Image: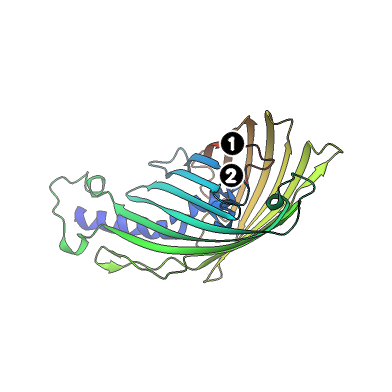
Amino acid sequence: MKKYLAAIIALVILSVGKLSAQEELIYNQYHFNYYLVNPAMAGAEPCSHLMISNKMQWVGMSDFPMTQLLSFKTRVWNNVGIGAYLYNDRNGYSNRAGGQVTFAYHIPLSNGRRYSKKTSYDRQLSFGASFKVNYFYINTDQLYADDPNAQYDNAFANTSGFGVNANFGIYYKSYGGFVGLSLTNLIPMTADIYGDKEVPAPLTGFLFGGYTFDLGRTGDYYIEPMLMLKMDQYLDINMDLNLKFGQDVSKNWGYWVQASYRHSWDPNNIQSLVLMPMCGFRIHGFQLGYAFSLDLNNLVTQNYGTHEIMLGYSFCYTKHFCR
């Protein structure tokens, strides 16, 4: 009996993972790196960026979800950018790992005026495409830990699987303004797990846009409002409202603070309302960021929120690392 009960629990966890953890924790980290939701951002700046992050969700609850991420993006030729990321996501008995590789092409549209003399930095149109691989599995050792004498049933023997997918994005920036549109899960792939076909990840679109307002004559201070919309093929919609303030003191150091609010119109999403204060600072090429998410739902009194730490390095100076 314990054997079948454990299998049912695993299926429930896996289904919840498809709703909330299937790369959602990766996409949610776009505040530190917009490349995670739009492949056209790979090499959008003529600089190389390396980022690692660790996200701990619903800290304080038993066996809370945790996600590690490593990403890199760079401009390799005048108009060509590449990028990649690897991730590992643990959510109870369910574990996921994978990554993507990206090719992007950037079309300069101006000769440059405000930020630099480089043609491609001030105003450009970018296109990008990515190929993704995901591996997921159930930790059966942990699943049957309470019943060491349990025998695996053939109906539940297949506890892991691979999936491949692709995404595409367009990104446009003009001096202080920027807008991006991307589609992910373009390939309706299914995987066989527990003897049945998993529901394909839904086709999902991301639309974001914002503007950076320089404050004062020197432009050392800036404020950046930004809006992000996410909608899948089932018309489940998420909206993020972000407001960032920063000071670029010099090429040696700077800092920023941001307040974000997320609202979901998906009745199956237990994170329907989320408040996200975050901050970061730069010393030379190093960036350190921290984000805290407070889910305004019935779990708010049962955990200590979600914590995310990012460490990044830029191999040259740019005004906006977190984009």
- Residue at (76%, 53%) from the top-left corner? 111
Give residue 289's quadrant in the image: top right
At label 1, counting other C-alpha atoms closer than 10 Å, the crowd grade (few under 14, some 14-19, many 20 or more) is many
Identity of the amino acid at label 1? Gly
Q: Is residue 237 visible?
A: no
* Place of residue 33 in the rendered image (x, y in percent of width and height, measured from the top left): 57, 47
Placement of 282 over or under 258, stated as above or below: above
- Residue at (86%, 38%) from the top-left corner? 216
Q: Nearer the viewer, residue 131 or 280?
A: 131
- Mark before the other along the chain sequence, 1 or 2: 2
Q: Is residue 313 visible?
A: yes
Identity of the amino acid at label 2? Phe
* Place of residue 252 in the rendered image (x, y in percent of width and height, measured from the top left): 68, 28
Circle 1 is placed at which residue position? 289
> Does residue 318 appear to the left or right of 129 in the view shown?
right
Circle 2 is placed at which residue position? 32
Marks 1/2: CA–CA distance: 8 Å
* Place of residue 281 in the rendered image (x, y in percent of width and height, measured from the top left): 64, 32
> Does residue 59 appear to the left or right of 296 in the view shown?
left
- Residue at (51%, 55%) from the top-left corner? 270
* Place of residue 291 in the rendered image (x, y in percent of width and height, measured from the top left): 58, 40
